[in-house]
């Protein structure tokens, strides 16, 4: 018997589903991003330059 692995979603599908742009599309997604920003997390490379 081989080992069982969970279903692997492709990187493209994952980015489209729960990436930055997918979050920006919805009101609740933007709320999540703002919450993460307030905690001090960098969300994407553009944030590195805006937070200086």
Image: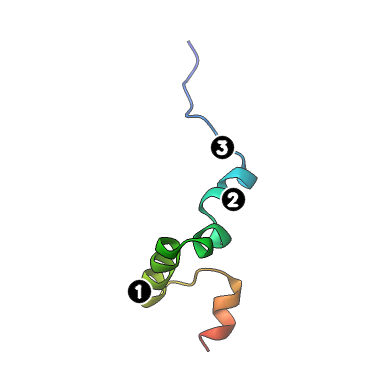
Q: For numbered disc 2, what is the local secondary structure?
A: helix
Q: Which residue is mark 1?
A: 39
Nearer the observer: mark 3 or 2; the answer is 2
Q: Residue 47 location in percent, x, y?
A: 54, 77
Secondary structure beneath dot 3 equals loop
In this view, the residue farthest toward the bottom is 52
Q: Earlier in the sequence, mark 1 or mark 3?
A: 3
Q: CA distance from mark 1 to mark 2?
A: 24 Å
Q: Check disc 3 and report the residue beneath it.
A: 9
Pick whichever, 31 or 37, lies toward us: 31
User: On screen, 10 above or below 31?
Assistant: above
Q: Dot 3, crowdedness within 10 Å: few (<14), some or many (≥20)?
A: few
For the residues labelled 3 and 2, the Cα–Cα distance comes to 11 Å
Query: What residue is rendered at 55% in x and 85% in y?
Result: 50
Q: Residues within 10 Å of mark 2 (few under 14, many from 20)?
A: few
Closer to the chain start, of discs 1 and 2, is 2
| Pointer 2 residue | 16
Counting from the top left corner in percent of width and height, residue 49 is at 59, 83
Residue nearest the viewer, comparing 26 with 8: 26
Q: Nearer the viewer, mark 1 or mark 2?
A: 2
Q: Which scheme is used to colour this image of the protein?
A: rainbow
């Amino acid at each position: 018997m081989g080992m069982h692995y969970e279903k692997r979603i492709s990187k493209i599908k994952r980015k489209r589903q729960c990436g930055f742009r997918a979050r920006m599309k919805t009101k609740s997604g933007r709320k999540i991003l703002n919450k993460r920003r307030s905690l001090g997390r960098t969300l994407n490379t553009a944030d590195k330059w805006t937070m200086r």
